[in-house]
Image (tube, grey):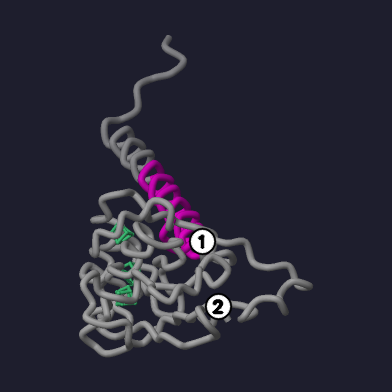
Amino acid sequence: MNPNPPEPKQASRFRFLRQGLARLAALALGVLGGMSVFGARRKNTVWQIDPLKCVQCERCATECVIAPSAVKCVQSYPICGYCQLCFGYFQPNAPGLTSAAENQLCPTGAIERLFVEEPYWEYNIIEDACIGCAKCVKACEVFGNASFYLQVRHDLCLNCNNCSIAMRCPSGAWERVVADQPYKLKHKPAPKNAVAALKRERPPWLV
Ligand code: SF4
Ligand code: SF4
Ligand code: SF4
């Protein structure tokens, strides 16, 4: 006599259904677990631009979901030459070396030019006016010390899952960085005892 007689048809259908439901529940738990790990990872990272990869294509000004863009130009004071003739500030064929609007390269007048002492001038970004177009960045990179560069400002950025600028950046300059080190500085922050030697302790946008 067969020790394992076949189950009645209805019982075997029920067992099949129960196993299917159990597998489905396990799958759902797996997906939820994966999503929460992804969510936690995403929460701990933010978007940032690697200034050494940016090719100043100007898309940072036009592709952000907020307007004006969460990307702004920043000034690296330790790198800046404090040049009298700043190529990031003046139009290539500027009629004069003054702060008159027709001499300026920035389309929104977002760069402030201040006299320091002969022959040095200081250039500051007026953040509220900057649209992240990178025109000054490109000129400073080609003809100057490359002290201007773009960064995502985390007091403005929405940290979108699929950043619309990152998706269209032609040079792969966008990456996720850990949230407690959200900026990719061109210079190393000055050691504390050297801070007094700098014109400013820290760039104002980093405070
Ligand atoms: S989209 Fe990329 S290459 Fe273009 S300006 Fe922004 S960071 Fe630079
Ligand atoms: S030129 Fe463009 S990136 Fe540079 S300060 Fe003006 S708006 Fe900002
Ligand atoms: S993550 Fe969103 S808000 Fe931030 S820079 Fe990209 S598109 Fe703009």
Q: Amino acid at mark 1?
A: Lys
Check the image and report above or below for 196 versus 142.
Answer: below
How many residues crowd mark 2 within 10 Å: few (<14), some (14–19), many (20+)?
some
What number is the disc on residue 184?
Answer: 1
Is residue 66 visible in the rendered image? The answer is: no
Q: Could you tell which of marks 1 and 2 lies nearer the N-terminus?
A: 1
Name the mark nearer the viewer: 1 or 2. 2
Residue sitting at 29 percent across and 78 percent down? 131
SS class, disc 2:
loop
How many labels, in total?
Answer: 2
What number is the disc on residue 203?
Answer: 2
Is 72 or 10 nearer to us in this picture? Answer: 72
Residue 109 rendering spot, x and y as whole percentages: 29, 85
Residue 123 rendering spot, x and y as whole percentages: 44, 80
Residues in magenta, as a range: 22-50
SS class, disc 1:
loop
Q: Quadrant of ligand 3?
A: bottom left
Is 36 or 6 nearer to us in this picture? Answer: 36
Residue sitting at 43 percent across and 58 percent down? 51
Cα distance between the residues tagged 1 and 2 = 13 Å
Residue sitting at 41 percent across and 69 percent down? 152
Q: Is residue 183 left or right of residue 142?
A: right
How many residues crowd mark 1 within 10 Å: few (<14), some (14–19), many (20+)?
some
Residue 171 rendering spot, x and y as whole percentages: 31, 49
